[in-house]
Amino acid sequence: MVVDSADSNERLLAEAGQIAAGTDTPLVLLTRITEDEIVENAETLQAMSDAANTPLESNSAREVATRFASQAADEAFESVDGTVEYDAVTVVAEEGEFADEVTRVAAERGCDHVYVAGRQRSPTGKALFGDTAQRVVLNFDGPVTILTE
């Protein structure tokens, strides 16, 4: 499951969590951060680390992104009947590369289904096949659930 800051994230986590709990299947939560975000947010990441009393190590931006995904999952899974096991993974990728990272991680982890938030697009935008959700649909060898905002 791709975890980002979209408003639909909580709904998507809850849906994936219900299915995972019902089938006793673990989830892989995937989030991304870019090299520019790592540089731009270094001070903010340190402040967040200090506030949480959790020291950041060498891959601090990746750690914070992984914690974000884990916290979002924990909150969403509170409403799920049953236990949801998951592993949070963060990749460093630019926007155009993220869909490839999603399919790569899914293949490495043996995922048989991908959940991703999409966005409403115009007919012209849909024809361009430029966003992550559409590229995942085209490249992943299995079912893809897209929840639009």
Image: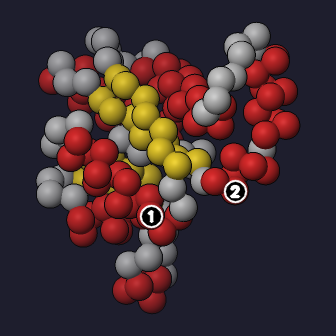
Q: How many discs mark residues in the rendered view?
A: 2
Residue at the spot 51% in from the left edge and 55% down from the top edge: 93
The circle on residue 139 is none
- Vertical relation: 148 (above or below) 22: below
Please tell me how crowded label 1 is: few (under 14), some (14-19), or many (20+) other residues with Cα within 10 Å. few
* 66 up-or-down from 52: above or below: below
Q: What is the basis of the colouring in this image?
A: secondary structure
Judge from the rendering whether residue 112 lies leftward or rightward of residue 73; answer left or right: left
Q: Which residue is mark 1?
A: 97
Residue type for callout 2 = Asp
Question: How far apart are the two marked residues, 2 and 1, measured between alpha carbons?
Answer: 14 Å
Of residue 142 and residue 105, the one placed in the foreground of this image is 105
Residue drawn at 23 percent across, 42 percent down: 108
- Residue 145 appears in the picture as rendered: no
Q: Amino acid at mark 1?
A: Glu
Residue 119 spot, x, y in % from top left: 49, 63
Say if residue 42 shows up in the picture.
Answer: yes
Residue 12 place in picture, x, y as percent:
41, 41
Does residue 101 appear left or right of residue 125 in this picture? left
* x 17%, y 38%: residue: 110
Could you say where residue 140 lies in the image, as x and y percent from the top left?
21, 58
Quadrant of residue 46 within the rendered picture: top right
Mark 2 sits on what residue?
36
